[in-house]
Structures are given as C-alpha cells and as structure tokens.
Image: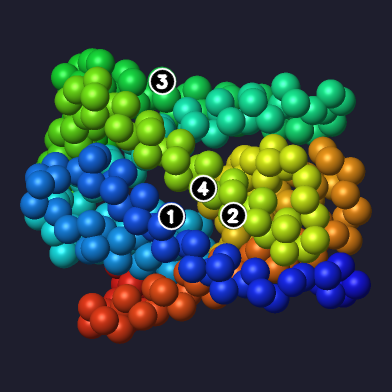
C-alpha cells in the first residue's frame, strides 16, 4: 500500500487513452493477414479485436483468440478458418519480435538470473516449434494439408463423416489463409507493424514506471513488455490474473532488483488499467453491435 501511494493520478487518463493506438495498430496488421483486405473495415477489425480482449478478460483459457475470428467472420467477408489462420501468422510475427527484443534486453543485463535464462530457452523452444510448423505449412502446403486431411479422415471419417467433411473444409481454408502473405513487401509491412506495436507496449510500461516516480532506462520497460508477454502467453485464468503479476515480479524484482512490494504494486495498477480498458471498451462495442455476453459465451 505504501508503494501504491506513490502513483501520480495525472498519468492515468493518458495511460488509458494510449490503448487506442495499440488497438489501431493491431487492426492494421490484422487486415494485412486477411483475404479480401481491400474490402475490410479497420474500424470493424478494431471492434472485433476489442471484443476478443474483452472475452479474454472475462472468460478463461484466452477465449478471445477464438472469439475474435468468429466475430470478424460474422461482420466481414472472411471465413472463420481464414481468420484463425491469420491469428496463427500473428503469433509467428509476435514470436519473431519478442525473441529479438528479449535478446536485446538480455545483452544489457550483466548478471542475468538463471530463472530468466531458463524462461528464455523455453520461449525459444516453443517459438521455434511454432515457427517450424507454420513455415512447413507455408513451404509445403500441399503435403502438409494432405497429411491433415488423411489424419482427419482416418480418425473421424468412418464414425462421423459429416464432421470429417466439415473439418477438412476448415483445413483447406486454414492453409489458404496461411498463404495470404504473397510478397516480401507484405512480410516487411507485417513485421514493421509488429515491431511498432510491441515498442509502443514497452513505452506504455515505461510510462507506468514514470507514474510511480521511477525513471530508469527504457530497457526496463522493454523487459517488462517481454516478460509479461511470456507470462500471459499460455492459457490461464480470466484476465491473466496471477501470470501478469508473475511477469512483473520477474522483470522488476528478479532482473532489476526492485523490491517485491514495488513490483506487486506496479503489477496491480498496470493490470487494473488494462482490465478497466478492455472490459469497458469491449462492453461498449458489444452494446453498439447488438451482441450480448451470453452470445459470446455460446461462441466460445
């Protein structure tokens, strides 16, 4: 509570408003990864993104990652499978950005704690597996797609032929979505927007440090950015309760030597601001679009 008393309340409105350009950058990047991009509305993609974050903050297991493509498929000329494939490619771009930013942070810390190095190795392994799977699907789409079609037919074809046909159709659309990046220029645009988004997130965490009266190197905000992204990557409780705090404590207390009390107070304020914005903005979008929480749950 003593640490919470250090927060300068004048920072709070700016920290809340700064979420809007982040949603806008996410929507711009998402449009690059979807088919029929010239027909897509950035505003609708922003709305779908906010509903996805809303769902992840009120439902468990990162439900927003599934609800977001469901919602956009309902509003825009995009199939659910293609939208889901675009989110897989988003995760690939995020992995590349976060890995490179993590390495940039690690070289600036002389005595890195073993737990952080172990976490970095785990992230590298998981990201490598994801990158390998997506690249293999991209480079050899015909063979990989044929393998999954055969696997689904063998498992479900005899007992549930209708379900097998439906899943195989989704697999076809998924691989079509993976091939949406058709040029080197488009790949560069996706990576540039991804880096811009993650750097802006790091600036947000740095600004929250300023709100506490702390003015460290920018790399502290970047380490917070990477550690929290790592902590909340796996499915967890609604709103990432607990894992968000763990990421803050790892970055601030374990790596940079801040007190655990300060790290916890920082995590409470940061988490509260993100919860207020994502639930509030998501609720407003649901009301504006005529959706209800029960319909979102049913989609999940």
Q: Position of residue 258 (x, y in %)?
A: 88, 49
Q: Is residue 281 left or right of residue 243?
A: left
Query: Callout 1: few (<14), some (14-19), or many (20+) C-alpha neighbours within 10 Å?
Result: some
Toward which corner of the image does residue 112 lie, by quadrant? top right
Q: In this rendering, which labeled residue sits more in front, label 4 or label 3?
A: 4
Instruction: Tell which of 221 and 275 is nearer to you.
Output: 221
Mark earlier in primary sequence (4, 3)? 3
Q: Quadrant of the C terminus?
A: bottom left
The image quadrant that residue 37 belongs to is top left
Disc 4 vs disc 2: Cβ atoms closer than 8 Å? yes
Above or below for 198 versus 238: above
The residue beneath circle 3 is 132
* Residue 47 can be seen, yes or no: yes
Q: Is residue 96 left or right of residue 72?
A: right
Residue at the disc numbered 4: 200
Tell me, yes or no, whether the two marked residues, 4 and 3, touch with CB atoms within 8 Å.
no
Q: Nearer the viewer, residue 19 or 274?
A: 19
Q: Position of residue 88 (x, y in %)?
A: 35, 39
Q: Report which residue position mark 2 lands on.
A: 204
Q: Is residue 213 left or right of residue 57?
A: right
**Which element type, helix, strand or loop, lies under badge 1?**
helix
The CA distance from mark 1 to mark 3 is 28 Å
Q: How is the image coloured?
A: rainbow
Element on which disc 2 rests = helix
Please report contact status of discs 2 and 1: CB closer than 8 Å, yes or no.
yes
* Residue at 78% over, 45% down: 216
Residue behind mark 1: 22
The Cα atoms of the two marked residues, 3 and 2, are separated by: 31 Å
Q: Are marks 1 and 4 in contact (CB under 8 Å)?
A: yes
Earlier sequence position, callout 1 versus callout 3 = 1
């Amino acid at each position: 509570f003593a640490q919470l008393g250090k927060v300068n309340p004048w920072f709070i409105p700016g920290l809340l408003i700064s979420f809007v350009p982040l949603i806008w950058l996410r929507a711009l990047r998402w449009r690059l990864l979807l088919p029929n991009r010239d027909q897509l509305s950035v505003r609708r993609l922003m709305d779908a993104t906010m509903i996805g974050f809303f769902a992840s903050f009120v439902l468990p297991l990162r439900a927003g990652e599934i609800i977001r493509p469901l919602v956009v498929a309902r509003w825009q000329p995009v199939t659910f499978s293609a939208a889901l494939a675009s989110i897989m490619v988003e995760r690939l771009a995020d992995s590349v950005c976060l890995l490179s930013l993590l390495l940039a942070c690690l070289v600036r810390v002389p005595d890195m704690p073993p737990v952080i190095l172990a976490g970095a190795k785990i992230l590298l392994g998981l990201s490598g597996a994801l990158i390998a799977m997506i690249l293999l699907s991209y480079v050899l789409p015909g063979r990989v797609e044929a393998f999954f079609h055969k696997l689904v037919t063998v498992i479900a074809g005899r007992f549930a032929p209708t379900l097998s046909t439906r899943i195989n159709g989704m697999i076809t659309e998924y691989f079509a979505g993976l091939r949406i990046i058709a040029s080197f220029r488009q790949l560069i645009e996706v990576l540039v927007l991804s880096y811009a988004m993650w750097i802006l997130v790091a600036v947000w965490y740095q600004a929250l440090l300023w709100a506490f009266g702390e003015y460290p190197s920018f790399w502290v905000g970047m380490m917070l950015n990477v550690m929290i992204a790592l902590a909340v990557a796996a499915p967890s409780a609604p709103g990432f309760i607990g894992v968000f705090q763990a990421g803050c404590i790892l970055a601030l207390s374990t790596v940079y030597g801040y007190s655990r009390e300060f790290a916890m107070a920082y995590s409470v304020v940061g988490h509260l601001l993100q919860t207020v914005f994502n639930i509030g903005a998501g609720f407003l979008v649901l009301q504006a679009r005529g959706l209800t929480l029960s319909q979102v749950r049913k989609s999940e």
